[in-house]
Amino acid sequence: MTTPGRSQVRRLLHPLTTSLGLLAAALAAGAVVLLEPRGLGTAAAGLLLVTGAGAAAGFANSGST
Amino acid sequence: MVRYFAAGLLLGATAVAFIAAAVGALPQALVPAPARWALFGVVAVAVLGRELRLWRLRIPENARLVPERVQQLGEWGALQFGFEMGTGMRTYSPSALPHLALLAVVLVVPFPAAFALGAGFAAGRLAMPLLSNAWSDDGGWTELWARSDRVVRPLLALVCVGALTVAMLPG
């Protein structure tokens, strides 16, 4: 039987949780890029977006292999 | 061992990103941005539809399974295997997103940002074995992924296409 603590940790490991985490990070970085068109923060957010796109591709590529 | 595998992933992904960015320097210098964006947009829509299961689209992939002896690799073997996996060309590709990311590097992503994309790919690729091992020892992750695939794949496709589009918006 799974203990409640173990169950919560497992929920964090779920592929859906990981994907939602990527989505949240992309939304936050996207908001910075769209709302603040210039500045160092925007450049960093742009890089974070590109990194997030790569991470989504890498995670999708791994699948269950 | 995981560190060697992770280092290999990063090396493989950044090597591919570097080559793609070098190849892409020519079209990015010579072809007008609207034409490059139009081509990227068409492919992005095609990939998005594939990931959303709206249509079938065959993609180039290396139809080779990962051998089971991979579990017994030494440190340098893990580095080499990580490098191969980091290129995204070592085994089957269940998703077309790596192909889209590669095309983005060639057509629309500026040279320095290509390395960020490669590093992200390596991190995403590394997440799977880490999460799988942490989840259970009995291969339960494979079943879990299969059950979640219907939601996770479209979600990842939206994140990938959306993030690339917003990041490359003209400032």
Image (cartoon, coloured by chain):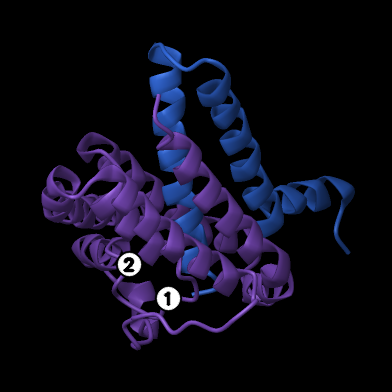
Could you tell me which chain the residue with mark 2 belongs to?
B
Which corner quadrant of the image does residue B155 belong to? bottom right
Please provide percent x and percent y for residue B7. Answer: 27, 50
Q: Of the residues under marks 2 and 1, which one precedes in the sequence?
A: 2
* Amino acid carrying mark 2 in the image: Gly
Q: Which chain is blue?
A: A
Horizontal side, residue B10 vs residue A33: left or right: left
Mark number for residue B93? Answer: 1
Please provide percent x and percent y for residue A11. Answer: 76, 52
**Residue B76 versus residue A20: which sits nearer the camera?**
A20
Q: Check if mark 2 and mark 1 are on a common chain.
A: yes
Tag 1 secondary structure = loop
* Amino acid carrying mark 1 in the image: Ser
Identify the residue shown where x is 11% and y is 50%: B26
Please provide percent x and percent y for residue A47. Answer: 39, 31
- How many marks the image carries: the answer is 2
Residue B3 appears in the rendering: no
Asked if marks 2 and 1 touch (Cβ < 8 Å), the reply is: yes
Query: What color was chain B assigned in the picture?
Result: purple
**Quadrant occupied by the N terminus of chain A:** bottom right
